[in-house]
Amino acid sequence: MNIIFYHPFFAAQDWLVGMTQRLPQAHIRAWQPGDNDRADYALVWRPPYEMLANRGDLKGIFALGAGVDAILEQERQHPGTLPTGVPLVRLEDSGMAQQMQEYALACVLRYFRRFDEYHVLQQQQRWLPLVPHQQSDFTIGILGAGVLGKSVAQKLVEFGFKVRCWSRSAKQINGVQSFAGNAQQAAFLHDTRLLINLLPNTPETQGILNQQLFAQLIPGAYLLNLARGAHLVENDLLQALEQGQIAAATLDVFGQEPLPQAHPFWCHPRVSITPHISAITLPEQAMNQIAANILALEAGGPPTGLVDMQRGY
Ligand code: NAP
Ligand code: GLV
């Protein structure tokens, strides 16, 4: 079995060693431009177009992350990049759900307990107790109720928050109010005080975080964008912050990464930034999942995390 590996910044050697330990029968190599030798499986993150093009020999393509938008975008730009019928498999949780819970909970508590405002007051050397927010009027809405959205919802429920989620299909998650489809989007947004985005980036969800959506939230709402920069219309957020419709935002993902030096988000007093780290790929857990999925495919069974090419996630 031959496996090719490409990641723009992961150390390939660690993956070659780790995958060989898990699949001793496999020969795994770091893909280099010009390498057209046989490959049964490809492990990729933002692969160059030539890596996957014309590879009719592939039996499976494994994304080294949860989102497959970059791979599917290549297929849109270069139709035929993804060999027809070859399963595209993504990482499902593999240690990302807990990271996302930690990140979301930290931000929620920061805004709910007004630590962001106390930080400003400290800088002004002002001793000023603020009126506490009440959980009863601090409803948290989560866009996306998949592996990560559901897990974040469950953690926030544990902390006593009122949580609702919005997805394509209705969900049953203990303590979480479910809204589904475009028909229920307005009802979901209405009463939401803090919005967390955990949608996949697809043609339907691009630009969903826009002025029209912000206007439907409770005035002075908070925004966490933890999914993809393409979801957010950046100028609409700047305007909503200016108008007070959005009180503050935490952004982990951006239209252009790294965020350009001159970008207004860097110095905005009510925007917090992290460099796309809310849930990173943990190599050991990712390799366990991928190796198990390769064995499942070899045995003729379905892998976990199979991407629906029509839906785009
Ligand atoms: P997932 O399991 O595929 O869940 C996606 C959710 O979004 C599902 O609930 C789905 O609804 C819903 N959805 C998709 N399209 C929709 C639409 N048009 N309208 C309404 N709901 C829609 O994905 P995941 O594993 O939770 O990951 C979500 C995203 O997080 C990834 O795609 C990735 O972009 C991002 N991510 C970011 C980081 C980071 O470090 N910042 C790390 C990991 C992942 P159904 O359940 O009804 O299908
Ligand atoms: C990271 O952004 C991922 O999709 O895994």
Image (cartoon, helix red, strand yellow):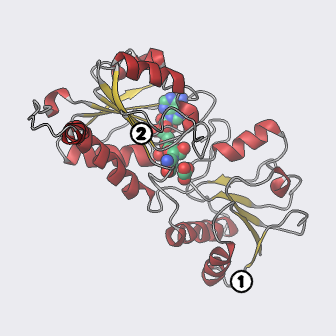
Q: Is residue 66 visible?
A: no
Q: Locate residue 248, reporting x and y percent.
A: 34, 31
Mark 1 sits near ligand 2, with its Cβ under 8 Å away: no
Residue drawn at 57 percent across, 42 percent down: 259
Q: Earlier in the sequence, mark 1 or mark 2?
A: 1
Which mark is on residue 145? Answer: 2
Q: Is residue 208 visible?
A: yes
Query: Is residue 121 positioned above or below 274 on the image?
Result: above
Residue for badge 1: 25
Nearest the viewer among 304 and 197 is 197
Q: Position of residue 213 (x, y in %)?
A: 44, 19
Q: Residues within 10 Å of mark 1 (few under 14, many from 20)?
A: few
- Residue at position x 50%, y 50% in the image: 275
Q: Quadrant of the C terminus?
A: top right
Q: Amino acid at mark 1?
A: Gln
**Image-quadrant location for residue 261:** top right
Label 1 secondary element: loop
**At label 2, which amino acid type do we have?**
Ala
As drawn, is 31 to the left or to the right of 105?
Answer: right
Tag shown at residue 214? none
Judged from this view, the residue extending furthest toward the front is 125
Can you tell which quarter of the image residue 160 is in? Answer: top left
Residue, x 23% and y 44% (percent of image)?
109
Name the spot of residue 98 as percent of width and height, x first.
37, 57
Task: Report the quarter where the N terminus lies.
Answer: bottom right
User: Is the distance from the Cβ of mark 2 to the nearest ligand 1 atom less than 8 Å?
Assistant: yes
Q: Is residue 255 left or right of residue 113?
A: right
